Image (cartoon, grey):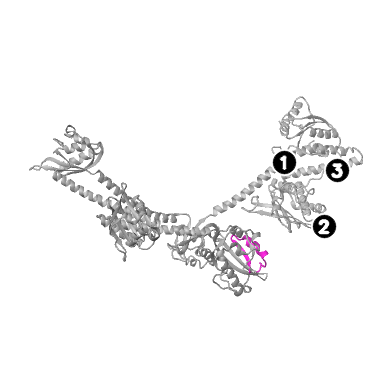
């Protein structure tokens, strides 16, 4: 692929085309792989050094197969390989490289052996002291096909326009001719001159169809006339077979296509190429029209089609003048018949009554004398024509003028015919009418022929009108379309621009285009836009056809996205004369696609998290019910000091595990957004400052903790306990990411979300809490899964994978947002965006004095559908000194109350089969307003629960239950 004209400087004098940042093939590889076209890098030996994905798709060789192999053996066709090798050798010897920097079109070879055209541009470079050649190749097979189709379409359009103009000229030249020979001579002359023939002729066949007489011809200067009589068989077997069956005879070169003796007949009258068109009437070959050339000629389909149409039109005109002649003859015969009293003659009296013997009328109509006498003759007239006949007859009688009319008449064979009537009155000396003498002439065939001729003329006019209307329609469509259409010549001057394109160009660039102006020149005061317009149009004017989508407009204003399709404009000979462009404003489509993609991604994530939230919420509830008796039993064993030191150590360990399980359930509930929250106004700065020591002691002395609080920070809406747990979780995650060495920065500041901003937050002001570390960081894939429950990068046994999930669930429940930024090797910054609270921070209550709960007295009605939970809770109450009455459902508890039971307090589970704990509390409040009710629930979703109703969450210990009862009483 090296070896065409051109000179280049020595490679050592030429800078790298990729700049100083590219110093090796390894650094060049991402650029090559990003290219859409095929990119091949070879060294001076022709060996492939780089081969991108585009090259794999274009040539079929994989990168692994191509790199190191000889490029010429893979992609250069055999007939070009010597030129390629000679060009490489010449370059190495003389530095003379003809094609470097040039864009050329050349054949290439695919792995499967097929050859196809490519557009090739070669650049050279020196990387690391090594000479390399970089080839950019694009498969232009589709473009070649499109160009060929466009050329063919333009040629067909030009041919059709030329054909229509010729036929229109022929029609006008023939319209006024009255003789058949004049029509045919005119047609042969015009057709011969139009197709640049040697000869064009017409002939009549002999009655036996074996011979024909050329009655007239047109011959070009230097060509002989061929008028005369000939035998059809002398022109060969093919001529006899085709013409006798009504098929045209087409011969491009009779010296090659016919037998020598057959070709000799043609050659004797100066013909080498011919098309002979037969005219068959009622199954007989009656005439011929032919076009000839004295040299060999490859006839086109359009030549045959034009000859066919000219033949049909010419014979139609011949039939037209023949019909006119027939009409003249008919009138002459009519006059002669009247004068000679011949034909279908009839007589009527002055009033139109038919009398006497009328043999001609009787023979024509089949009426008897009794039938036609008087006005009976009118019975033979078509019913639809009677009134018209009577009116015309009366006018003739009143005016004493000849009666001339046409009507349909029923013949003797019961068929209807059209008859021309002419009747002359005979008058007396005083001018009165004595009788009428008339003749009926059958003109049925004549009228049929005239109708056929009118139809032929009408079809011709319609086809011409349709062709002209098609042009106007195309222009109207282009002008009326919403697409922006521009056409420029090779000098960037507008050849055409529709209204939509002119308006949009003016909107973008501030100048309205005019035909004849330069599309580049009108942008002299806008150099950046001018260069962009010049560059993209230069591609199209350079022969490239392509489609691009890009944005245009003032960066300070709304920019629009456009889909631009550029095509090459060629003349009838296929030469490029410019380029044209169809542009559509696809701004809304692009924006809608972007919005749809974001919405679909958000929906998928929300559905995923909602499903996992529902799952984890249900699991957490069941866990709470399981943990309640476990935690209660272990708490009782610890308080009663059951067993020796070893047993107490085991009980303490089990109790610690149960507490850890309770914390895990809280995290699951937080992820599921079902953690019971007591959101209040929180001074985040004070909370974080108070946690500094706790965080430092938790993460260890080797990590430096920095706390930065923005002055004047407003309160945030949050649950302080849950927020502390969230911050502590994030701090532990940061410690693990830093391998216990680094800096942990806790920051609280005011943040603001603008309309249309990123994320799921509404516009407004928020308190932004961030936990940033200098640890290992996360890649994009890890960040995408960071908030998924049970996802952890800490390894088996080193984490639950619920830390970030709990934090995410917490902030979502509070109406905030969780944002994570991280880069591998640089650390991670987790931001909690909390809604700003409009309430003031409440003053802290004095801590209650710690005291030992005394033994209580009284009775408790305990309601729970879980037997183990109910039994464990009953044991706790008994230890506190209460008498316990148990019920497994709310309905059972109401039955006991109705039966007279009056407990000191009612402790009930919330969600149970049938009536819920809330419903039970409401019923008891109606019946016994002073009876205290404590609601216990393993679910964290407390929608529908009265906020004034005391609530204890499962699992709980003896002390938790005692404090809740004490607060209630």
Location of residue 518 in the rendering, given as x and y in whole percent from the top left corner: 47, 66
The residue that mark 3 highlights is 653
- The mark total stands at 3
The residue that mark 2 highlights is 702
Task: Determine crowd level at label 2: few under 14, some 14-19, many 20+ residues with C-alpha closer than 10 A.
Answer: few
Left or right: residue 224 compared with residue 140: left
Which of the labelled discs sits on residue 617, or is there none?
1
Q: Secondary structure under badge 3?
A: helix
Asked if residue 21 lies in the magenta stretch, the reply is: yes
Asked if residue 722 lies in the magenta stretch, the reply is: no
Q: Secondary structure under badge 1?
A: helix
Q: CA distance from mark 2 to mark 1?
A: 38 Å
- Answer yes or no: is residue 553 visible: no
Asked if labels 3 and 2 touch by Cβ distance under 8 angstroms, the answer is no
Location of residue 473 in the rendering, given as x and y in whole percent from the top left corner: 41, 54
Question: Which span is picked out in magenta?
Answer: 20-44
Q: CA distance from mark 1 to mark 3?
A: 27 Å
Location of residue 183 in the rendering, given as x and y in whole percent from the top left corner: 27, 56
Left or right: residue 304 compared with residue 609: left
């Amino acid at each position: 692929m090296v070896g065409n004209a051109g000179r280049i400087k020595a490679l050592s004098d030429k800078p790298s085309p990729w700049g100083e940042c590219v110093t090796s093939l390894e650094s060049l590889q991402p650029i090559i792989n990003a290219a859409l076209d095929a990119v091949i890098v070879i060294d001076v030996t022709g060996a492939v050094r780089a081969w991108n994905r585009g090259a794999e798709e274009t040539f079929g060789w994989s990168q692994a197969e191509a790199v190191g192999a000889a490029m010429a053996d893979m992609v250069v066709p055999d007939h070009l390989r010597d030129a390629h090798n000679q060009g490489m050798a010449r370059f190495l010897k003389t530095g003379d490289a003809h094609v470097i920097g040039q864009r050329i079109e050349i054949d290439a070879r695919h792995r499967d052996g097929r050859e196809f055209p490519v557009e090739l541009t070669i650049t050279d470079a020196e990387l690391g002291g090594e000479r390399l050649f970089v080839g950019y190749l694009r498969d232009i097979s589709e473009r070649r096909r499109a160009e060929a189709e466009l050329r063919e379409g333009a040629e067909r359009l030009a041919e059709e326009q030329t054909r229509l103009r010729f036929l229109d000229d022929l029609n006008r030249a023939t319209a006024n001719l009255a003789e058949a020979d004049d029509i045919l001579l005119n047609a042969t002359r015009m057709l011969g001159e139009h197709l640049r023939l040697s000869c064009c002729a017409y002939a009549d066949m002999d009655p036996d169809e074996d011979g024909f007489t050329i009655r007239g011809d047109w011959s070009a200067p230097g060509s002989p006339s061929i008028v005369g009589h000939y035998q059809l068989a002398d022109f060969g077997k093919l001529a006899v077979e085709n013409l006798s069956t009504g098929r045209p005879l087409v011969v491009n070169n009779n010296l090659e296509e016919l037998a020598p003796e057959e070709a000799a007949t043609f050659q004797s009258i100066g013909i080498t190429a011919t098309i002979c068109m037969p005219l068959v009437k009622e199954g007989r070959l009656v005439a011929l029209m032919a076009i000839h050339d004295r040299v060999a000629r490859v006839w086109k389909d359009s030549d045959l089609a034009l000859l066919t149409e000219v033949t049909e039109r010419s014979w139609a005109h011949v039939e037209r003048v023949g019909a006119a002649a027939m009409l003249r003859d008919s009138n002459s015969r009519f006059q002669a018949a009247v004068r000679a009293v011949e034909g279908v003659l009839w007589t009527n009296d002055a009033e139109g009554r038919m009398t006497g013997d009328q043999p001609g009328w009787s023979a024509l109509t089949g009426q008897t004398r009794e039938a036609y006498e008087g006005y009976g003759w009118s019975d033979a007239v078509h019913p639809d024509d009677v009134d018209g006949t009577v009116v015309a007859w009366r006018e003739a009688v009143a005016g004493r003028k000849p009666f001339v009319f046409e009507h349909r008449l029923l013949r003797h064979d019961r068929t209807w015919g059209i008859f021309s009537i002419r009747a002359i009155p005979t008058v007396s000396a005083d001018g009165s009418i004595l009788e009428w003498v008339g003749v009926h002439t059958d003109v049925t065939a004549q009228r049929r022929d005239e109708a056929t001729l009118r139809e032929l003329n009408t079809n011709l006019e319609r086809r011409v009108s349709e062709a002209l209307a098609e042009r106007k329609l195309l222009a109207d469509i282009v002008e009326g379309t919403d697409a922006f259409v521009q056409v420029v010549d090779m000098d960037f001057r507008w050849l055409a621009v529709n209204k939509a394109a002119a308006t949009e160009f003016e909107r973008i660039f501030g100048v309205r285009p005019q035909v004849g102006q330069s599309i580049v020149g009108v942008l002299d005061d806008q150099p950046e836009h001018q260069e962009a317009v010049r560059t993209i149009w230069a591609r199209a004017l350079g022969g490239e056809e392509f489609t691009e989508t890009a944005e245009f407009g003032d960066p300070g204003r709304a920019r629009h996205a456009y889909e631009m399709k550029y095509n090459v404009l060629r003349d009838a000979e296929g030469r490029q004369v410019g380029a044209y462009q169809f542009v559509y404003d696809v701004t809304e489509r692009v924006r809608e696609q972007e919005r749809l993609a974001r919405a679909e991604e958000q929906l998928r994530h929300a559905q995923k998290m909602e499903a996992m939230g529902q799952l984890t919420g249900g699991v957490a509830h069941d866990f709470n019910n399981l943990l309640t008796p476990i935690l209660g039993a272990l708490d009782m064993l610890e308080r009663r000091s059951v067993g020796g030191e070893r047993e107490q150590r085991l009980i303490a360990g089990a109790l610690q595990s149960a507490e850890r399980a309770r914390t895990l359930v809280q995290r699951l509930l937080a992820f599921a957004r079902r953690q019971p929250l007591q959101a209040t106004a929180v001074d985040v700065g004070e909370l974080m400052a108070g946690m500094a020591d706790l965080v430092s002691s938790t993460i260890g002395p080797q990590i430096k903790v920095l706390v930065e609080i923005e002055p004047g920070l407003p309160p945030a809406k949050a649950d302080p306990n849950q927020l502390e747990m969230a911050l502590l979780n994030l701090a532990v995650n940061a410690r693990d990411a830093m391998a216990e060495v680094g800096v942990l920065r806790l920051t609280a500041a005011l943040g603001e979300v603008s309309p249309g901003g990123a994320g799921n937050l509404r516009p407004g002001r928020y308190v932004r809490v961030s936990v940033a570390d200098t640890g290992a960081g996360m890649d994009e894939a890890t960040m995408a899964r960071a908030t998924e429950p049970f996802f952890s990068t800490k390894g088996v046994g080193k984490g639950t994978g619920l830390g970030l999930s709990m934090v995410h669930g917490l902030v979502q429940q509070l109406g905030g947002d969780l944002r994570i930024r991280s880069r591998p090797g640089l650390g991670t910054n987790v931001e909690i965006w909390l809604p700003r609270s409009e309430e003031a921070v409440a003053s802290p209550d004095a801590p209650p004095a710690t005291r030992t709960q005394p033994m209580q007295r009284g009775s408790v009605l305990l309601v729970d559908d879980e037997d183990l939970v109910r039994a464990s809770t009953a044991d706790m109450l008994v230890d506190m000194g209460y008498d316990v009455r148990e019920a497994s459902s709310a309905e059972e508890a109401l039955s006991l109350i109705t039966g007279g039971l009056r407990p000191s307090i009612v402790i009930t589970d919330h969600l149970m089969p049938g009536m819920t704990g809330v419903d039970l509390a409401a019923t008891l409040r109606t019946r016994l307003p002073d009876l205290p009710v404590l609601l216990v629930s393993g679910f964290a979703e407390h929608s529908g629960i009265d906020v004034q109703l005391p609530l204890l969450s499962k699992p709980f210990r003896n002390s938790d239950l005692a404090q809740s009862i004490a607060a209630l009483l």
